[in-house]
């Protein structure tokens, strides 16, 4: 292994033609890379090999053809959670997911999938070394790998690869990336860890600084300690402050602060309705997509700038 800071975006682009050839006709390969992907510390040849292994497995699982999607996005793990898989050390990673809409794996296959020489394929068709090699590569890189699979629906293999600083020559050569965020800081309050990780990734990819809190009470402490340019909070939160109460408390101290509250109709109904939602708070319907979240935040900040220029 020769791990080096590696530009994933370039590697995936360069490997795409080879992947398409390996899976053959009848199967399309689609790549979706999040903007501003971090670099990772890996052996590039081994990642190419891993992607080919995963694409070939996906192909074999889709006897009638189908689609392979390769997604990549920045992934920050702020702390270890109980049932987290794989067992990663908290830190920054890029998650590369290879998903197919093929056969899926029965439980007994999933349980043994990473075992060397475990295969369900006919003698001569598979050696059972593909996934064990991918596993070894991810672990030795200081990352990990996990599988989500559903019979008849398909399989997603997630590779988590550790963050690396860009090499100096590259950093110098690359012009700064134009992004919408101007490093404004957003206080993100959400008790669901997956939702919070999703929102944080979206906002960081837009170049905002994100301060994360799990409860309204924690958020208030952070608000007192750091400069915050926008509050984005879930409505239903554990602890003594729900999102609406948190917004009211914070707005009492900073009346001009933009506020977005994320809520399903059910959440609002179960926390006393809309009557105590602060007037300037904007409601973002849950579940929201990355695009909806990005648009609402960018819109608020641009209005704020316009307001400042106008006054
Ligand atoms: N995308 C997938 N969908 C469904 N089953 C899969 C998928 N990927 C792997 N498997 C199952 O896991 C087993 C092990 O996969 P692995 O890549 O390690 O070996 P193989 O594909 O059988 O052989 P080799 O990769 O060495 O040619 C496969 O035989 C298959 O049963
Ligand atoms: Mg294989």
Image: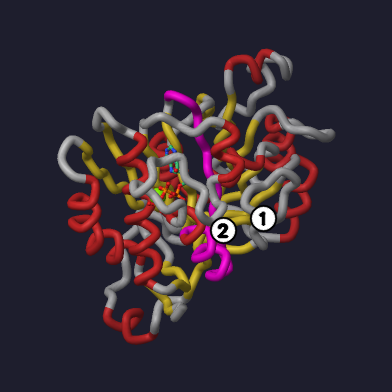
Residues in magenta, as a range? 134-152
User: Could one spot residue 151 in this view of the protein?
Assistant: yes
Query: What residue is shown with label 2?
Result: 144
Which residue, given by chain and number where applicable, does mark 1 sit on? Answer: 87
Above or below residue 203? Residue 59 is above
Among all residues in the image, which is located at the extreme right?
240
Helix, strand or loop status at disc 1: loop
The 10 Å Cα crowd at callout 2, few under 14, some 14 to 19, many 20 or more, is many
The relative height of residue 104 versus residue 54 in the rendered view (above or below) is above
* Label 1 to label 2: alpha-carbon separation: 7 Å
Q: Position of residue 15 (x, y in %)?
A: 25, 61
Query: Which one is in front, 246 or 157?
Result: 157
Element type where label 2 sits in the image:
strand
Q: Mark 1: few, some, or many residues within 10 Å (few <14, many ≥20)?
A: some
Does residue 141 belong to the magenta stretch?
A: yes
What residue lies at 84% left-to-right and 33% top-to-bottom? 240
Confirm whether residue 200 shows in the render.
Answer: no
Q: Position of residue 37 (x, y in %)?
A: 39, 60
Q: Is the residue indicated by label 1 positioned so its CB lies within 8 Å of ligand 1? A: no
Q: Is residue 87 above or below residue 301?
A: below
Q: Position of residue 104 (x, y in %)?
A: 45, 32
Instruction: Residue at 28% x, 66% y: name it.
Output: 10
- What numbered label is drawn on residue 160? none
Magenta stretch contains residue 136: yes
Point out the quarter of the image occupied by ligand 1: top left
Image x and y of residue 168, in percent: 38, 85
Q: Is residue 226 left or right of residue 205?
A: right
As rendered, which of 18 and 126 lies closer to the eye? 126
Tags 1 and 2 in contact by the CB under 8 Å rule? yes
Front residue (pair 173, 150): 150
Drawn side of residue 32 relative to residue 85, left or right: left
């Amino acid at each position: 292994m020769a791990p080096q800071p590696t530009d994933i975006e370039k590697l995936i682009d360069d490997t795409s033609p080879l992947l398409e050839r390996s899976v053959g006709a009848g199967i399309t390969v689609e790549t979706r890379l999040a903007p501003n992907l971090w670099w990772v510390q890996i052996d590039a040849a081994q990642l190419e090999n891993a992607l080919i292994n995963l694409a070939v497995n996906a192909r074999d699982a889709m006897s009638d053809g189908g689609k392979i999607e390769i997604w990549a996005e920045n992934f920050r793990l702020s702390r270890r959670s109980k049932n987290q898989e794989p067992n990663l050390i908290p830190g920054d990673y890029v998650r590369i997911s290879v998903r197919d809409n093929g056969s899926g794996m029965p439980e007994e296959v999933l349980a043994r999938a990473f075992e060397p020489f475990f295969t369900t394929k006919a003698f001569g068709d598979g050696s059972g070394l593909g996934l064990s090699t991918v596993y070894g590569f991810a672990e030795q890189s200081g990352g990990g790998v996990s599988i989500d699979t559903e019979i008849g629906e398909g399989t997603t293999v997630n590779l988590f690869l550790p963050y690396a600083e860009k090499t100096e020559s590259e950093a110098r050569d690359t012009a700064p990336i134009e992004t919408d965020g101007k490093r404004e800081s957003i206080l993100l309050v959400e008790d669901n860890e997956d939702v919070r990780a999703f929102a944080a990734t979206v906002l960081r990819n837009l170049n905002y600084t994100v301060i994360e809190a799990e409860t309204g009470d924690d958020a208030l402490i952070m608000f007192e300690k750091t400069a915050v340019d926008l509050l984005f909070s879930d409505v239903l939160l554990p602890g003594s402050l729900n999102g609406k109460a948190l917004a009211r408390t914070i707005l009492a101290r900073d009346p001009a602060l933009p506020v977005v509250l994320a809520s399903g109709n059910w959440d609002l109904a179960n926390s006393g309705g809309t009557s105590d939602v602060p007037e300037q708070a904007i409601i973002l319907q849950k579940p929201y997509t990355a695009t909806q979240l990005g648009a609402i935040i960018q819109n608020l900040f641009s209005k704020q700038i316009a307001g400042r220029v106008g006054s």
